Image: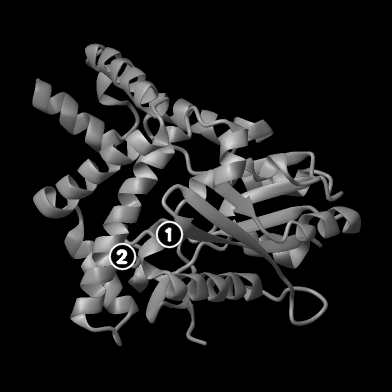
Amino acid sequence: MLFFKIKHFYAAKTKPLWYYYPKFANLMKIFFQFVMLISKLPLKIQYIFSDLIFVTGYYIVGYRKNIVQENLRNSFPEKSNESIKKIRKQFFKNFSDYLVETVRSFTISSHELRVRVQHINQDIFYEAHQEGKNVILLAGHVFNWEWFNALATVIPQEKCFPVYRKVNNSFWEEKIKNIRNSYGNHALEAREVIRHIFKNPNDGNSVYMFVADQTPHFSEVTYGLKFLNQKTPAFIGYDKLATRMDLAFVYCEMKKVKRGFYQVNYYRIYPEKEKFEEFEVVKKFHKFLQNTIHKHPDNYLWSHRKWKYQDSVKIYDEE
């Protein structure tokens, strides 16, 4: 009977395991209280947990080491094995920091976040505001993308909308959404954001924050491009906006200055002609992102199977 219920859960993927076993829900709530306690500790102490996560994940468990190795090797064929291993090891250190910093996000104040994250080139947002154009902010999975949400507290736009993918777990969906809604933000689920942008007045008072290097589901893969020496399926939802609306597209470049401190540079993305052509903004974003990764390759999220749907690409741009 237990086997049947677990099998049904994984087959349907509609009801969490604690739907059948309510005690799991209580355990999850207890675990979250523990997470909140950790979140309130000084960050210096939290980084001790990061060190423990790194040692456990890298040396004992070997969490996704082969995936990271493969992604790095395919992305940087010119680098030696020694260089790849060095990048891999530093990635796992940065990834461990990212995990505890995400926990910290539950309780970190806007003041502390403004101290820890320096926003450069803010004039871009004032220019877009004066032009009466809403901003589409495009970031990659560069550490720590979770911490640029406090941008909303330092720019003239009245409304900021972080875009996120829905989490299957309803409990964590609510908690993670609360992080996205901090600092006056209004989080939007990815499936509803395009409709929201088309309906919202394009008056320069809104910023939409995309982590734009998401890997689309294989059923949604259409366009792909050469990125990091590989055929890469690309998320193109924001491309429809570029070709149909007069918006300000901005690239967000995250840089880890030192542990717990980041610098964010913003760069306006302009079309070659009067308006963006199809897939033009997608290609320009990926060129910006690739340049960022080449400068600090250990600060990118290498642990996901980003290239697993290569064969599903129908339109491939190798330029």
Residue 303 visible from this viewpoint = no
Residue 130 is left or right of residue 60, and the answer is right
- List x then y, in percent, for residue 201: 84, 45
The mark nearer the N terminus, 1 or 2, is 1
Per the image, the residue denoted by label 2 is 308
Looking at numbered disc 2 in the image, what kind of residue is underneath it?
A: Lys
Looking at numbered disc 1 in the image, what kind of residue is underneath it?
A: Thr
Q: Quadrant of residue 8?
A: top left
- List x then y, in percent, for residue 38: 35, 26
Helix, strand or loop for disc 1: loop
Helix, strand or loop for disc 2: loop
Per the image, the residue denoted by label 1 is 215
Quarter of the figure with the N terminus: top left
Circles 1, 2 touching at the beta carbon (< 8 Å): yes
- List x then y, in percent, for residue 31: 29, 21
Residue 248 - label: none
Residue 45 is left or right of residue 176, and the answer is left
